[in-house]
Image: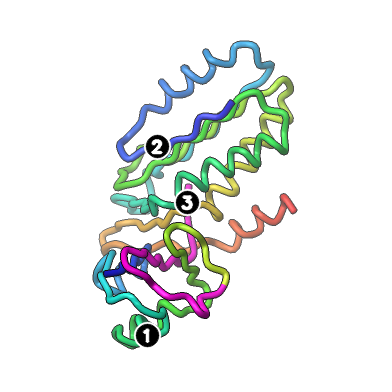
């Protein structure tokens, strides 16, 4: 399995901080989610990181076994 | 020399500052910034969330960039993650330099980037419940000062 991680307010939208998903192309993984969640995950301010590395473009990304894809909304520290 | 930590439990800023100062007795100036949960505005609790694969590595990179930009002899960054209460320390930045302006600038630069470019998500709890805090336009403006 692969794993999706939802940070910040996206955790509330998803109702969970993490979700196991079947490996495969990201487009296919997102298409299998609740459309209301998928819309939020694809928001223009949301960045994505694959195994801790920020993605500049999710086009062509495929999740393999054990991969972790994190959805990162705007940050706010301090 | 840099000391960068993600604190998952409460830390004692006074003890941290004293230890930092003792390690940098040769520095001409030390600037210390402490961010804490304000005890006003009806905030009952604050939660900072981090993403383990990225948050501490990002803070370490920020410390490297800060030290490359100003001649500081020592830089310490301690940032909490988890649930905090009014009066609790959130973030501590200490910069020691030969001259004060470098210490002020390094601490200021590090704080602006911790506020709006580090991998933390913040929510606060009031009588109405929990609410996620989005970055303020001022935070963006603060960041743009550094070019």
Secondary-structure class at tag 3:
loop
Give the mark toward the camera: 3 or 2: 3
Secondary-structure class at tag 1:
helix
Secondary-structure class at tag 2:
strand
Query: Which stretch is magenta?
Result: A57-78
Query: Do discs 1 and 2 belong to a common subunit?
Result: no
Is B49 located above or below residue A69 in the figure?
A: above
Residue A9 shown in magenta: no
In this rendering, position of residue B137 left or right of residue B79: right
Residue A60 shown in magenta: yes
In this rendering, position of residue B71 left or right of residue B51: right
Q: Which residue is mark 1?
A: A28
Identify the residue at image location x=55%, y=55%: B116
Q: Residues within 10 Å of mark 3 (few under 14, many from 20)?
A: many
Give the CA distance from mark 1 to mark 2. Answer: 43 Å
Image location of residue B9, percent across then percent down:
30, 37
Q: Which residue is mark 3?
A: A77
């Amino acid at each position: 399995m692969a794993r999706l991680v939802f940070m910040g307010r996206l955790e509330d939208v998803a109702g969970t901080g993490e979700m196991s998903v079947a490996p495969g192309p990201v487009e296919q993984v997102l298409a299998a989610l609740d459309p209301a969640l998928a819309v939020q995950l694809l928001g223009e301010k949301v960045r994505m990181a694959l195994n801790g590395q920020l993605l500049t473009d999710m086009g062509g990304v495929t999740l393999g076994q054990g991969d972790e894809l994190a959805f990162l909304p705007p940050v706010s520290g301090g | 020399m840099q000391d960068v930590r993600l604190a998952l439990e409460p830390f004692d800023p006074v003890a941290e500052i004293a230890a930092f100062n003792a390690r940098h007795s040769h520095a001409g100036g030390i600037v210390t910034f402490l961010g804490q949960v304000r005890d006003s505005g009806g905030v009952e609790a604050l939660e900072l969330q981090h993403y383990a694969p990225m948050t501490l590595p990002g803070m370490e990179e920020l410390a490297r960039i800060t030290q490359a930009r100003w001649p500081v002899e020592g830089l310490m960054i301690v940032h909490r993650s988890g649930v905090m209460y009014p009066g609790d320390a959130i973030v501590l930045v200490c910069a020691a330099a030969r001259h004060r302006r470098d210490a002020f600038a390094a601490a200021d630069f590090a704080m602006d980037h911790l506020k709006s470019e580090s991998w933390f998500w913040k929510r606060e709890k009031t009588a109405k419940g929990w609410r996620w805090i989005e970055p303020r336009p001022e935070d963006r403006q603060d960041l743009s000062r550094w070019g």
